[in-house]
Image (tube, helix red, strand yellow):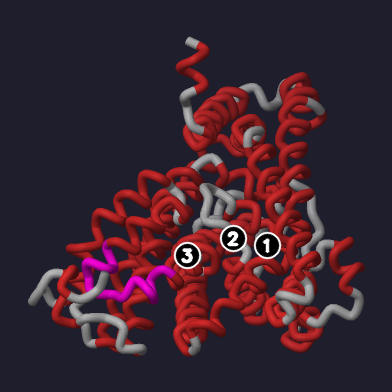
Amino acid sequence: MISKLKKISLGNWMIIGMILGFITGLLLNFYLKDPFIKDIILINNVFYLGGNGFIKLMKMLVVPLVFFSIVVGVASISDIKKIGKIGGRTILIYLLTTGIAVTIALLIAGIIKPGEGLNMVAIVKTNITTNITATDTVLSIIPDNPFNALANGDMLPVIIFGVIIGVILAKLREETKLVNDFFTQSNTVMMEMTRIIMKFAPIGIFCLMAKTFASLGFEGLIPLTKYVICVLIGLAIQAFVVYPSLLVILTRLNPIRFFKKFISVMFFAFSSSTSNATIPLNIEKLTELGVSREVSSFTIPLGATINMDGTAIMQGCAVMFASQAYGMDLGTSALLTVIFTAVMASIGTAGVPSVGLITLNMVFNSVGLPVEAIGIIMGIDHLLDMFRTAVNVTGDAICTIIVSFKNKAIDLDIFNGKKEAQDTWD
């Protein structure tokens, strides 16, 4: 029995925690007026401690994880010098598609309004200020004291400071090898810490879900369902509208031929929930489509590091979900801040399961949203993570084809099925 329990994946344990927490919360909702249930179990002790304790652990990760990830991510782009225009075009297209992705998410969630009716203010007392002007947004990006920004968790200055250090390390790679190794190893430590803390996620999710639905009852189920719908619609638009449109506009190639060949990679990414594990298969399928391995061997690993369109969609929907649940009205400047932060977060989001939830803290902090709302969506994140990983790897492949086409590194006869891949590219 114990051996069978050990075989259950973390993602499945998170789903189990969500279901049990949801059921427990609904049952306790009938006894909410009981002082023992309300004051001892729900608020002051068990569920409050378990849920908020896990939230604090996640908060602890955010600043160092994002800072080291961004420094390492930017510093690793030094290979662009070896490939010339390919690197610049690749990064530009990756950032463009990520920006489009989070914008689509904000628009869809603004229309469907998944957070309406949740009334999180009644559960979590918080003071939220959304009066962010465009001038304040620009000024907040510039770190007047980066160490204060790191200590206070001011994410925009932390991001910019990390990007600047990464660029310098990329430029002075041989002269700063010791410093580069420090950041690389620190990033490895933070990723391992993330894996350890995420093992407690099922318990944290159970407590957060139980506490929330004990207070809200069945009324909380509809907003959560609407959130899932928002994310899935956003992912579908990105995968089957945005990517094919870019492929047609920039290359005039047939997207149907691409999807026929690439569908197996999408299924593998869906089942594995990790972009990194899909890298070899992605490169192989692109070779079968006529893309030069010299290009794909650079752009696909790079995309697994900095191109997280599916994650950006989840983050955009989550921001709108939380803002609506707390009765906030995000202004234009705040929404632009979300787009910028989500795009920058994609640089530091590793291609492993559910790490986007950690960087979601950063996006929430950028507009002053309480991170407690993340606990409500964590339980269903594993399922959504499978879908968004499939979108992530599809974006990597489409961008690679576009870059290959622009650099004359794709055999169009192979792509169009007029000859086999081995006839040209090794």
Dot 2: element? loop
Q: Earlier in the sequence, mark 1 or mark 2?
A: 1
Question: Mark on residue 69?
Answer: 1
Up the image or down, 246 lies above or below 260; here it is below
Marks 1/2 in contact by CB < 8 Å: the verdict is: yes
Mark 3 or mark 1, which is nearer to you? 3
The nearer-to-camera label among 3 and 2 is 3
Q: CA distance from mark 1 to mark 2?
A: 7 Å
Q: Which residue is mark 3?
A: 301
Q: Is residue 84 left or right of residue 242?
A: right
Residue at which label 2 appears: 349
- Relative image position of residue 68 (x, y in whole percent): 73, 62
Image side of residue 94 versus residue 210, left or right: left
Quadrant in the picture for residue 192: top right
User: In this rendering, does residue 9 appear at all?
Assistant: yes
What type is the residue that disc 3 sits on?
A: Pro
Residue 146, quarter of the rendered image? bottom right
Q: Quadrant of residue 254?
A: bottom left
Q: How packed is label 3: few (under 14 Cα within 10 Å), some, or many (20 or more)?
A: many
Location of residue 410 in the rendering, given as x and y in whole percent from the top left corner: 27, 81
**Towards the viewer: 97 or 332:** 97
Which span is picked out in magenta?
Answer: 285-297
Q: Please tell me whether mark 3 sits on a helix, a strand or a loop.
A: helix
Q: Residue furthest left?
A: 418
Give the left or right position of residue 356, taking residue 104 as reference.
Answer: right
Name the amino acid, label 2. Thr
Q: Position of residue 11 (x, y in %)?
A: 50, 37
